[in-house]
Amino acid sequence: MPKTTNHLLGSMSKSESQIDFRTTPSRYRHWRLNVEPPLAVLSMDVDEQGGLMPGYELKLNSYDLGVDIELNDAVQRLRFEYPNVGAVIVTSQKDRIFCAGANIGMLSTADHFAKVNFCKFSNETRCAIEQASSESGQRYLAVVNGPASGGGYELALACDHIMLVDDGASAVSLPEIPLLGVLPGTGGLTRLIDKRRVRRDRADLLCTTTEGIRGQRALEWALVDELIPASQLYEKSRERAIAISQNSINTLPEGGICWSDLERELSQSVIEYPSLTVGLDGTTSTASFTLYGPDQSCPGNVVDAQNLGIGFWPLELARALDDAILHLRTNRPDINNWIFRVYGDGSLIREYDKFLVRHSDSWFLREIRLYWTRILKRLDVTSRSLIALVEGGDGFSGTLFEVALACDRIYMLDDNKRSAISLTGMNFGRLLMANGLSRLETRFLNDKSMMEKLHAVSGKILETKLADQLGLTTVTPDEIDWDEEIRLVLEERTSFSGDALTGMEANLRFGGPETLETKIFGRLSAWQNWIFQRPNAVGPDGALRTYGTGRLPRFDKTRV
Amino acid sequence: MPKTTNHLLGSMSKSESQIDFRTTPSRYRHWRLNVEPPLAVLSMDVDEQGGLMPGYELKLNSYDLGVDIELNDAVQRLRFEYPNVGAVIVTSQKDRIFCAGANIGMLSTADHFAKVNFCKFSNETRCAIEQASSESGQRYLAVVNGPASGGGYELALACDHIMLVDDGASAVSLPEIPLLGVLPGTGGLTRLIDKRRVRRDRADLLCTTTEGIRGQRALEWALVDELIPASQLYEKSRERAIAISQNSINTLPEGGICWSDLERELSQSVIEYPSLTVGLDGTTSTASFTLYGPDQSCPGNVVDAQNLGIGFWPLELARALDDAILHLRTNRPDINNWIFRVYGDGSLIREYDKFLVRHSDSWFLREIRLYWTRILKRLDVTSRSLIALVEGGDGFSGTLFEVALACDRIYMLDDNKRSAISLTGMNFGRLLMANGLSRLETRFLNDKSMMEKLHAVSGKILETKLADQLGLTTVTPDEIDWDEEIRLVLEERTSFSGDALTGMEANLRFGGPETLETKIFGRLSAWQNWIFQRPNAVGPDGALRTYGTGRLPRFDKTRV
């Protein structure tokens, strides 16, 4: 697939290899995960020669997508394999550096697509860290045992508590603006202001001071939560982690499930997973997802479900869907339209949903719900046209109908009541979007009477006419028009400027309130993407290109 | 100033002229303003040959910055000259077209700076229309008497009520994405979703359907509020306007003040207004604003104040500041740093503030407060480094300290209590930012104890040490360091990439909640600016370049 590999991370690679998001601690090159419940320590020790692409060295714990893929795996794995961990220490295994942020060599050679995709995934992982802290009682502490600059400090900002070594040298810094002409775009600006409530003029000073801020002043400005003398680093950080984990410790379960490798078969035209098949058609630029419902009844109790582990249907499908999204976003920029179908027995799917709702106090089922929450949020920020096709059967029920609600349009076949959808408790406040609302609440913004109507039909089979009256579909062609209608919409989407569609999606998909998270993906990422296009950053004399060469960047000083 | 004129509206003009934001109805070329209290009719009748720059014709009521300058004047003037108007009808004087939106010829020749600046100003004017509807009881009705496309429909969306002629032909449309490869960026996407609560999939259909939507379907989808038969257009729209104006009619005052031309003297190095001088220094890329306090006591009552009209000090200064901001933003992109000083007697300034607070039920004083609100919001979205210099005296009091709070940094001279600032009632909830909070609330996000402390010192003289303890300053150099410190910060700002600073400001200045308005300037504008850089829109084969040439655009289909 030489046509697309130059998008992966810069255009220097002629490799046919695709980026794989599946990994496991025994294969980590950049992180060490040590688990001693109730604590876990996630230590960064980036292999300088371990870059995902050739052409740059990952010095000073700087990172590229490969490093972040391992972080994502660790954060994810901790939720399912180690629910008995109440606090996770994020620190550096290297001397005198915590993390130098995203690798500049990588950023300067990566093309626009690669930069934007890399930032999106990094942001998702950091939001997942915050979700673990807030929803799973698995709280993250950054133990900043050396300088943390740029993305390094941004990683700390995603943690619940930041401890900084008070050694007279270690500073937190965001030198992107003075050194690189870009933003601290992995949530840095937003988390300073909206999460840590750092005063805006102090944030301005921090972001324009290359050397950063250390010690007492960092504490006073709320850039960190605590200073630790270098000599007491180990003890004090463990003490604090234990103290923080006390909040969850009484409710921690014994142990988790085995998070073994996800099976998949990949070819140019199809990806096969358990419970999910994705057909790929370059001609129409379309990926056709078919989500399969369960082939057996839901277990009768939580222990039986947990014993199924990754084979428990909602988790099996979640893992497949998550991987497919990441794979296609990164490796197949040539595929613009993602269409979703469900094949399965709606009554079984609703049974699983009921089980998830009924046993919401089980850590295992809670984690599955939170995982689906994260996956659906990935869809919300995926810059592809997302279209649900409801044709035959009632598979689009509950959690699976939530996939349709994440789509830009829902086409539903008007076929004499053979096609149906159904709502369950999962559609009402259990799979929240980044804006803090359910997808139904976002769809019918502030329309309480509509929400009451929908509550009233929860659990019922809604055939096409009724679903349409309830505002749950977009277009409802009959059998004569269906094929032509779908062909036309795919052709139409493919004819548009992808950039305009990306901008449209970023605005239409996020009605209602904005939160820290929507601000990161909306406001902050949009400005960063703009800057990633500007000659001051990426031109021949731009700061990303000249950094480290000894040449000074040349800026067009015009303020736009 | 040939160096900058190519930024104004495309690079085709060699003219030395600068864009003037001052106008008056007798000089309008594109709008007719007819006032018959309690109604006013603002009719668009764009002069095809009246473009601000050569090279394009303003056909079909399409607009450029010149057309919008007149609209801004009318909206502004209606507030002060015609407070006895309770409803404003916005309509077209041309047959068979309401408004075709921003002129494509202008957009295709304008450079990036010009496009971004044009959109910002247009957005501000549309937000001013909404402020008039919501805060002044001057409600806007769009009477869409022909097709309204793109920016034409977006203008209607800024109105309180949209009436569409039901003639079987007139549609509302947002064809930017299919035709031009850009967004409906003047608030369109945001107002569809967050103001009118149009379902996101319907918004998607509308935005991808070139011909738009008309009649019953437009009504059903909430794209418009009312349909009117063509034969009853005149009567029905007047009836509705009268009905809407009834809400305010009992409280409408007799008449307004005379909104005569603003005096100013302009040279390359200085702009002089009553109450404001702006020195311009190209070497340091700095505009030095000196705001002058009143030279006499505040009038004893509202009638006397109103009799002073535009000579009433808070209004006189407001008009000057507003014009200076617009002039510099548009005509002087070479000036990157704006520094603000106040020269005046703080006790007099506080007296005026008290007067404004005490007589908040006076239409005249309310309009002055709302005008300051709009001007300060302009500063918030101005992409320049804004720095307040508090050096000597206590002129930075109340409303004028709000200017400092809008700045990125506040430098305050530590000079043995000769420099001081002071808070008044105007700093507490009367000059709200676009996020719905006061600037103090935004500065100390959710810190209630800090807000209580500040309330407690309202009206007091706060010398440097105290102001600093209260978090109201950024840096407080003494007299020995002052000059050097200011020189350094200006040099530093000038050395950075302007793009990175713009992105930083857009994120650091807007803590806390997001609203319709912040979404327009943050999320929507940022994505539009990104698209305005992309070859799919502005490259040689981009849609903005090929539109109307008979050539088809060529898109890179990669989704980023």
Image (cartoon, coloured by chain):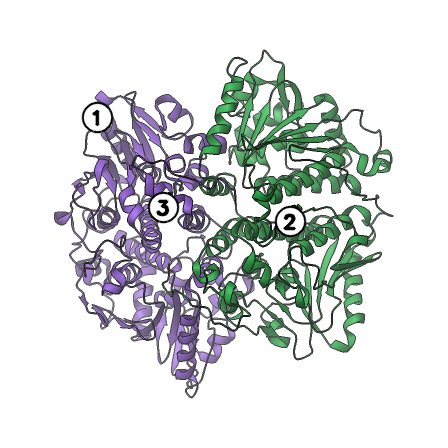
Chain colours: A green, B purple
Say which residue label 3 marks. Answer: B540
Three-letter code, disc 2:
Ser
Q: Residues within 10 Å of mark 1 (few under 14, many from 20)?
A: few
| Towards the viewer: B336 or A142 | B336
Of A154 and A139, nearer the camera is: A154
Q: Is residue A469 left or right of residue B537?
A: right
- Secondary structure beneath label 1: helix
Q: Is residue A155 above or below residue A459?
A: below
- Where is mark 1, residue-wise? B235
Badge 2 and badge 1 in a common chain: no
Question: Which quarter of the rendering shows the C terminus of chain A?
Answer: bottom left
Front-lying residue, A43 or B2: B2
**Which residue occupies the foreground of this view, A96 or A145?**
A96
Residue A15: give its label: 2
Give the residue at the far bottom of this rendering: B480
Label 2 SS: loop
Residue B446 is at least partly visible in this image: no
